[in-house]
Amino acid sequence: MDTLEILRANLLSPLVLAFVLGMIATLVKSDVEFPEPIYKFMGIYLLLAIGINGGVDLAGTTFAEFIWPAAAAIFLAVATPTWSYLVLRRVGRFDVANAAGIAAHYGSVSSVTFIAAISLMESAGQAVEGFIPALSALMEWGIIVALFIGRFNLRQGDTSLGEVIRDTLTGRSVVLLMGGLLIGVIIGEAGYERIEPVFGDLFRGVLVLFLLEMGMVAARQLRGFAKVGAFMVGFGIIMPLLHGIIGVTLGHLAGLSVGGSFVLGAIAASSSYIDAPAAVRATLPQANPSIYLTSSLGITLPFNLIVGLPLFYLYSQQLYRWWYAI
Amino acid sequence: MRTTPVRLVTMIAEGLLEDRLLQEIQKLGARGYTCSAVHGHGTRGISESFWEGAQVKIETLVSPETAERILDHLVAHYFHDYAVIAYVSVVETVRGEKYL
């Protein structure tokens, strides 16, 4: 498929269409609304399903295959919030709290983007390594790195960073992804067959509903659009592009497949929308939520889902062609 | 029936502060509390931005001294950075010794 065709296929996928519908619903002030418990349930289901599917695929993976991709994920978790912070401070002229708060978002993972990336690979028939959910969990450390930078520069010490570390590591995405992986490894193919109707067949349908909700959430953040300014709009688009390209390249160097490198790039490009806002609000309350929420949810999330993912996929394919042409 | 005047301290805060505030008011002398999820609109607009976790309303019946300590604590640690409001009213209750 050429570039335009992949962009068009992504744009017309049920996931992106549902996301756009959600955005429109909010913009025209429709009364479409998911009850909070249902929205939470869908999030739990999707993360657990991805974990379990990954775990089942893990059979036969050696530790040596995992170690370099894990190193790449850890590097990204440290590097992306660090340089995001520096760019925000030096170029964007943000104060320490706001720069660190935004960096925590761009240095960690958006579960929606991650799940959408996995789903895109499934529909493209592209295999993805089973341990990918573990890489996503590792990259949640980006939040801690950014908050540490912020707290260190502010010399702030009233609430303990230990609490934030605990909250991040026991947060739902880490627990469900890692727990799901473990369940998948233990039950194996045979055990999975019996739960497949719920965790396999239903997955894409639930994801469509979830993206409808995320479209509404994203559009709600657009109210703050005027407040964030041109710099943040540019940052919210250029940073994910840069992180995506670096992520795919590193994935490739670490020995991941086309699909695996693509997903690593997608999660590097993504910007957290649940764990990071809560952690930043708790530790750096002086940072302005309308800046980090608008850029992360209102700009970067739609950009990644609509344009970023197909571009990273194309880049990942292209990289492999170049590699093998040499 | 004989009633005693006690202070009702009501705090309305961002949902993510719930656990922290509950622990702290108990340390400051509150012996019990009632907590409910609420929603509304305030000057900071935080409730509109954060879609996860509603606002929380915490009510506690305490002595005038404890009420004072709780308010001082909120002034020192919360009012500047967080979306929190608090108010105190005098209410009449039976079994006043339970709260004081």
Image (cartoon, rainbow, N blue to C red):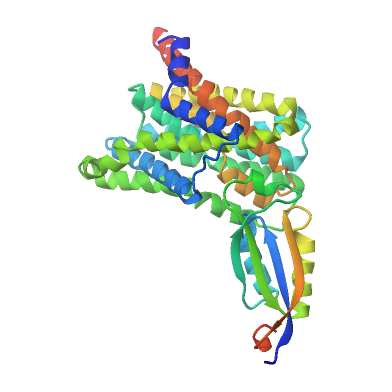
x and y percentages locating residue A94 in the rendered image: 77, 35
x and y percentages locating residue A22 in the rendered image: 52, 33
Q: What residue is shown at x 66% (from left), y 64% (from top)?
A: B21
x and y percentages locating residue A254 in the rendered image: 44, 26
Q: Please determine whether, in this image, residue A23 is positioned above or below residue A141.
A: above
Q: Can residue A64 be seen here? A: no
Q: Can residue A204 be seen here? A: yes
Give the residue at the far top of this rendering: A325
Query: A30 or A243, which lies in front?
Result: A30
x and y percentages locating residue B1 in the rendered image: 67, 92
Q: What residue is shown at x 68% (from left), y 70% (from top)?
A: B25
Q: Please determine whether, in this image, residue B60 is positioned above or below residue A68.
A: below
> Residue A274, located in which quarter of the rendered image?
top right
Q: What residue is shown at x 56% (from left), y 30% (from top)?
A: A24
Q: Please determine whether, in this image, residue A296 is positioned above or below residue A250.
A: below
> Image quadrant for the C terminus of chain B?
bottom right
Give the residue at the far bottom of this rendering: B2
> Residue A81, located in which quarter of the rendered image?
top right
Query: A59 or B93, which lies in front?
Result: B93
Number of disc labels: 0
